[in-house]
Amino acid sequence: MGFHTHDAVSGRLGRVLVVADEPRIRRLVHLTLTKAGYEVVEAQDGEHAIQVLNSGDNPLMVDIILCDIWMPKVNGIEAIAYFRTQYPTVPVIVMTTTWS
């Protein structure tokens, strides 16, 4: 299953919001998706993701959200609840990691 949009002007396949507090995870996901042809927007926690989506006069449009569960401030569960109510048509993929 692929993302549903393609921006003919930029050549990008779609815009992905990556929400994770771990910088290494954000970087890995960012590099992987960018290499695959997606535009990536990052947020370090749920609070920042909500700010990113709602900044400026127009909400940022994304095609999909990848969201960690365990984060400070606004955690993934709270952020996903917000995404579901405010952006019900945007798919959300939940991810979580543990580093040892």
Image (cartoon, rainbow, N blue to C red):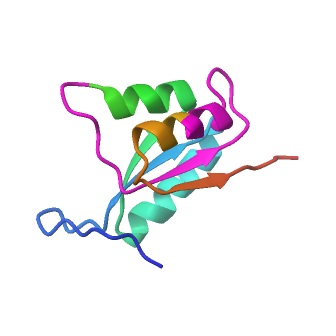
Q: Residue furthest bottom?
A: 1
Which residue is nearer to you in this view: 86 or 6?
Answer: 86
Q: Residue furthest right?
A: 100
Q: Is residue 69 magenta?
A: yes
Residue 95 in the image, given as x and y percentages of width and height: 67, 53
Q: In this picture, is 33 found above or below 47?
A: below
Q: In this picture, is 87 found above or below 16?
A: above
Give the residue at x 39% y 70%.
3
Residue 67 in the image, given as x and y percentages of width and height: 59, 46
Give the residue at x 63% y 31%.
78
Which residue is nearer to you in this view: 21 or 14?
Answer: 14
Residue 51 in the image, given as x and y percentages of width and height: 40, 25
Give the residue at x 62% y 25%.
74
Q: Residue furthest top?
A: 73
Which residue is nearer to you in this view: 54 or 29?
Answer: 54
Residue 28 relative to residue 96: left or right: left
Magenta region: 56-81
Give the residue at x 41% y 67%.
35
Name the image quarter holding residue 8: bottom left
What is the total number of numbered labels drawn onto the structure image? Answer: 0
Residue 51 relative to residue 74: left or right: left
Residue 65 relative to residue 70: left or right: left
Q: Is residue 58 magenta?
A: yes
Name the image quarter holding residue 29: bottom right
Q: In this picture, is 58 found above or below 28?
A: above
Residue 16 in the image, given as x and y percentages of width and height: 41, 54
Q: In this picture, is 11 found above or below 87?
A: below
